[in-house]
Amino acid sequence: MKSQLITNAVIVNEGQKKKGNILIREGRIAGIYAKEIPAFAFDGCEVIDADGKYLLPGVIDDHVHFREPGLTHKGDMYSESRAAVAGGITSYMEMPNTIPQTTTQEHLAEKFALAEQKSLANYSFYIGATNNNLDELLKSDFSKTCGVKLFLGSSTGNMLVDEPVMLEKIFRCVPALIAVHCEDETVIRKNAEQFRKKYGEDIPVACHPAIRSEEACYRSSALAVELAHKHNTRLHVLHLSTAKELELFRNDIPLSQKRITAEVCVHHLWFSDADYERYGARIKWNPAIKTAVDRQRLFDALLDNTIDVVATDHAPHTFNEKQSTYLKAASGGPMIQHSLAAMLEFHHDQQITIEQIVEKMCHHPAILFGIKERGFIRTGYWADLTLVDTACSWQVATENIRYKCGWSPLEGQRFRSAVTHTWVNGNLMYDNGKFNDNLRGMALEFDVDQKLKRRPISFIR
């Protein structure tokens, strides 16, 4: 493994910006030097001059859908991890609604094996809950598996968990983090039927946030939080989309003390319901993009620590799959290549500091999931790093989109910052448009005792 010395960077880490130099040896950060670099640091090193650029910890995305196995016409672990490192993301946690679904230990192991062969970034995978697989969930090694994914709203196949007895068992028995998609299916079906009566099968896409409504989100999130309080469950509520849901979460204690945490996705900070007219089903996500008021309240909650992390819910579909009528158009969109650039736009507009971006996209995912030796620039940690030029303007266009699906809802957007380099485990995986396709990422490791584990499994009744 090649040793490298990154010089003259502005290092953004743990709430500070400081000019400094980073020595990488054997995949890890071997030294951090504020001023003078010791002579031995140059021995056998490739030197990369980062003058004028910001060096950040690699971004950790806790919420992606890479579509492999079974849906690889949309994306796969190689293509989407490649897009990830191009966007400064060095680690991801992938969801279970593939084909077959990741609801057994066998299928979970198959995903890890695929990632070992194909992923340029570091990885972990959720095991998915169903109405009848509690035994499989409890077999999980949560030092390797990031958590359990629970759909309380519509999902692929049988992954909607809607039996009250099973929900109680899952919240009571699972000894690790449960990540929840919260939308109430009964409310959604009722709303959809009302719009069908009005429009038939030609419901306008702009009705999406009225169908997958504030009520649907809040009712489901409130249920999840209630169950978590009842059973002392480690709960993580994914992709908040409404201001009303924010009242369910706390901002008066440190993240390390929280049992119930929340995520917001970049698209819920970027778009509002006013954008459906322009973008149509290209911005059809579940949960739906809501009002400009919701968007602002979500942003405010991110800044005041009511919301803990920023993720993408990266979910590629082919362009044709997004172009059908509202009821048939696929929900979800590709975002992982552009999430950091989008957040840096908010920084340019003085809505968030670059230190806060690092906190929400790098530090907090590492703390929240108990990821070992990642998410910070610290001596001895794995050298997962991204170098950003905040004075490099570029435009999202077909020729520079790395997703297998070949499109982006941000196409045409001009960004003022660009990722120039990304290191994964000390390996330079992305360098100004060029990829190192010969190396692969590693499986993430989690400190179960510190964060994820709630109680010994022997306590389960």
Image (cartoon, rainbow, N blue to C red):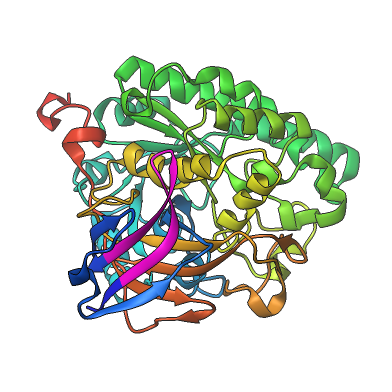
- Specify the principal SS of the magenta part: strand
Note whether residue 147 is visible: yes
Q: Is 263 located above or below residue 89 in the figure? A: above
Viewer-proximal residue, 372 or 189?
Answer: 372
Instruction: Find residue 259 and report its horizontal and vertical position in percent.
Output: 35, 24
**Quadrant of the image containing the C terminus:** top left
Indicate left or right for 280 with 386 as reference. right
Viewer-proximal residue, 174 or 438?
Answer: 438
Q: Residue at x 53, y 77 (%)?
A: 432
Instruction: Find residue 359 and report its horizontal and vertical position in percent.
Output: 45, 40
**Quadrant of the image containing the N terminus:** bottom left
Q: Residue at x 75, y 29 (%)?
A: 293
* Quarter-of-image position of residue 274: top right
Which region of the structure is painted magenta? 5-23
Viewer-proximal residue, 369 or 180?
Answer: 369
Assess whether residue 17 is covered by the magenta stretch.
yes
Q: Residue at x 14, y 32 (%)?
A: 457
Instruction: Find residue 340 and report its horizontal and vertical position in percent.
Output: 56, 55
Q: Is 299 located above or below residue 201 in the figure? A: above
* Quarter-of-image position of residue 102: bottom left
* Quarter-of-image position of residue 232: top left
Q: Residue furthest left?
A: 458
Q: Is 235 located above or below residue 342 in the figure? A: above
Indicate left or right for 119 with 318 as reference. left
Q: Residue furthest front?
A: 36
Q: Is 368 located above or below residue 391 in the figure? A: above
Instruction: Find residue 170 and report its horizontal and vertical position in percent.
Output: 32, 31
Number of marks in the rendered image: 0
Assess whether residue 108 is covered by the magenta stretch.
no
Note whether residue 149 is visible: no
Indicate left or right for 182 with 131 as reference. right
